Image (cartoon, coloured by chain):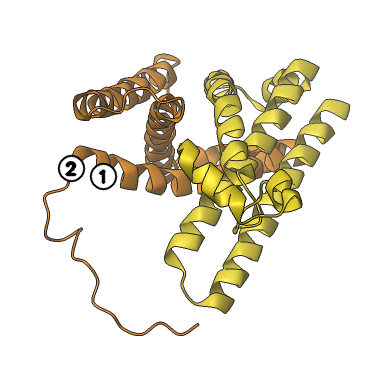
Chain colours: A orange, B yellow
Amino acid sequence: MPQPARPLSPFTTIYRWPLAMALSIVHRMTGIAIAIGLLLVVWLLLALAHGPESYATARALCGSWLGLVLLFGWTWALTFHLANGIRHLFWDVGKGFSIQQAKASGIAVIVASLVLTALIWACVFAQGGK
Amino acid sequence: MSETNNVRAADYRTPLKRVRGLGAAKSGTHHFIAQRVTAVALVFLVLWAIYLALALVHSDYAQAREMLHHPFAAVWLIAFLIAGFWHAQLGIQVVIEDYVHTRWLEAVAQLANKFVCAAAALAGIIAVVRIVLS
């Protein structure tokens, strides 16, 4: 059905973003990012199944600076989506709906995702090398 | 979903329509439930996948094959792939429903979403099976 050009509510450009709205948008964006990352996981598995040369190529790409930046971003996307997903599961059983609780859990999600990402990459670098 | 709502809706529906519980959307709560069930599974599967990824960071080809050769790792990895791509398909479906308003484009996008997620999951599973059986 063709859509007539109707004016849109300027809700994303005019109003100050509440934390819950920002987190909701980021949840969707990280979800899409993780889906793309999941395709990368399959590519890695296929490389490992195919043979040593393919695996070496895949490893080299993951270890390049572009690969590391993507992996780092993907780590944060995953930990954020995981933490915020757990927040959503609590909402699904009816817990944590008050404005103060939703704000506090939102901040907790941000902190948890950053701490988890830092921990994961600390583990990577603690093992030495890139 | 207050009680009065249900009673009023029941007045206009045949018993068959009510017992099917599908409503106007024809799919009932299946999407919602499937998204939550895969989400709960993924909480555990993702934590394990992170652990596996960290174990694999500095392993060479032989070590990586050895690690995934274990049936336990293979089962968890296949479960992760199925739950992950299922959850991704459900999530991307909602994003397409929300933002793609041209009907034919939406249909193409929804089909592509389903096909890519299913194909990638199958490819990943085949890869794991190949490693386990080698």
Q: Quadrant of residue B76?
A: top right
Position of the C terminus of chain A by quadrant: top left
On screen, A22 above or below A90? Answer: below
Q: Could you tell me which residue is drawn at 37 percent across and 32 percent down? A: A80
In this view of the protein, which residue sits in the foreground, B63 or B73? B73
On screen, B23 above or below B134? Answer: below
In this view of the protein, which residue sits in the foreground, B110 or A117? B110
Could you tell me residue A82's position as x and y percent? Answer: 44, 29
Could you tell me residue A121's position as x and y percent? Answer: 38, 23
In this view of the protein, which residue sits in the foreground, B86 or B122? B86
Q: Could you tell me which residue is drawn at 60 percent across and 59 percent down? A: B24
Mark 1 residue crowding within 10 angstroms, few (<14) / some (14–19) / many (20+): few
Please, what is the three-letter code of the amino acid marked with disc 1?
Met
The reply to whether dot 1 and dot 2 touch (C-beta < 8 Å) is: yes
Q: Quadrant of residue A119?
A: top left
Residue at the farthest right position: B133
Please, what is the three-letter code of the amino acid marked with disc 2?
Pro
The chain letter under disc 2 is A
The secondary structure type at the circle numbered 2 is loop
Could you tell me residue A83's position as x and y percent? Answer: 39, 26
The residue tagged 1 is A21
The secondary structure type at the circle numbered 1 is helix
The residue tagged 2 is A18
Horizontal side of A127 relative to A112 (left or right) equals right
On screen, B131 above or below A10? Answer: above
Q: Are marks 1 and 2 on the same chain?
A: yes
In this view of the protein, which residue sits in the foreground, A104 or A67? A104
Whether residue B82 can be seen here: yes
